[in-house]
Amino acid sequence: MPLVTSKEMFEKAYKGGYAIGAFNVNNMEIVQAITEACKEEKAPVILQVSKGARAYANHTYLVKLVEAAIIECPDIPVVLHLDHGPDFETCKSCIDGGFSSVMIDGSSNSFKDNIELTKKVVEYAHAHGVVVEGELGTLAGIEDDVKVEEGESSYTRPEEVEEFVTKTGVDSLAIAIGTSHGAYKFKPGSKPQLRFDILEEVSRRLPGFPIVLHGSSSVPQNYVEMVNQFGGAMPGAIGVPEDQLRHAASLSVCKINIDSDLRLAMTGTIRKYFAEHPEKFDPRDYLKPARANIKELVRHKLIDVLGCAGKA
């Protein structure tokens, strides 16, 4: 099937009490691993591309990789989404360039300016059959060009969501309830806890409306240990507990972004492979097991965390 928007996906996810996995892609192996897992588990998927990924791999290459995945996996619905679009021009470029969904991240602006920018993107996107994700609240951490210090982050204010959604016309809303970008989400020894009270209040004010969680990688400790064992230095990398993500998916969260987990699986596997096979130099040799481990990680997320396996 051709690219789809997330509209029908989210309607089914909301009613079914599960979430769609939104996986950031940067190269062929990651696209293959994600979509092969989704094909085998019969799961819908959102493949998302950041500004940094477009700078690294080129817009055209990424779009063509996704098109190839659709040919190879024709029975699963696939959304191609812009993650953290920084401005109208970037969103317009992706809309004109074949994406079926875009995010405009105006969360660092004032509430008034965020509404104005988001509404401008929504009007252009909807005129071209593309859906839009907006954001209220600011996540700490680093993801490509998005860098927010912990002291500058802010939870979403539930009293603002109705006005924001009504005035902008967005199709989904990313909120801040304690997640953060990158692999260092919580301090060692702390007890990670998402603000479900905020999520529940937002859901009460926006019944039936799809909510999105960014910064929701769980940072698998087996891959953190693998990275560190084979020459890496990632002390204190801690993510969001998977049981909390599953609970969020059972509520109004219809899209959960997963990024760092896949990068950790790839990096850990490659480090281990080179340590055990120092004579090897062919990229196919080390990228093949990296792709296989990403695939198994995605499969686990689909079944045990997102609950979207069998929902294609």
Image: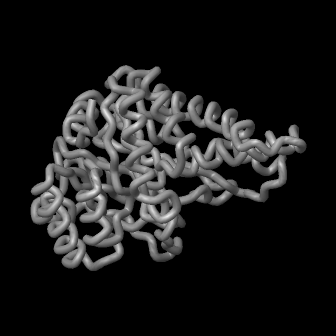
Q: On screen, 202 above or below 160?
A: above
Residue 5 location, x and y as percent? Answer: 23, 42
Residue 297 in which image quadrant = top right
At 19% from the left edge and 77% from the top edge, which residue is drawn? Answer: 112
Left or right of 94, for residue 179: right
Q: On screen, 312 above or below 136?
A: above
Residue 87 in which image quadrant = bottom left
Left or right of 69, for residue 11: left
Residue 174 location, x and y as percent? Answer: 32, 56
Q: On screen, 94 above or below 308?
A: below
Judge whether residue 225 can be spotted in this image: no
Residue 118 location, x and y as percent? Answer: 21, 67
Nearer to us in this view, 272 or 245: 272
Residue 281 in which image quadrant = top right
Which quadrant of the figure contains the C terminus?
Answer: top left
Count the marks: 0
Nearer to us in this view, 309 or 150: 309
Q: How is the protein colored in the picture? A: one colour
Judge whether residue 270 can be spotted in this image: yes
Nearer to us in this view, 163 or 306: 306
At 47% from the left edge and 55% from the top edge, which residue is drawn? Answer: 215
At 76% from the left edge and 42% from the top edge, which residue is drawn? Answer: 282
Which quadrant of the figure contains the N terminus?
Answer: top left
At 36% from the left edge and 37% from the top edge, which residue is drawn? Answer: 20
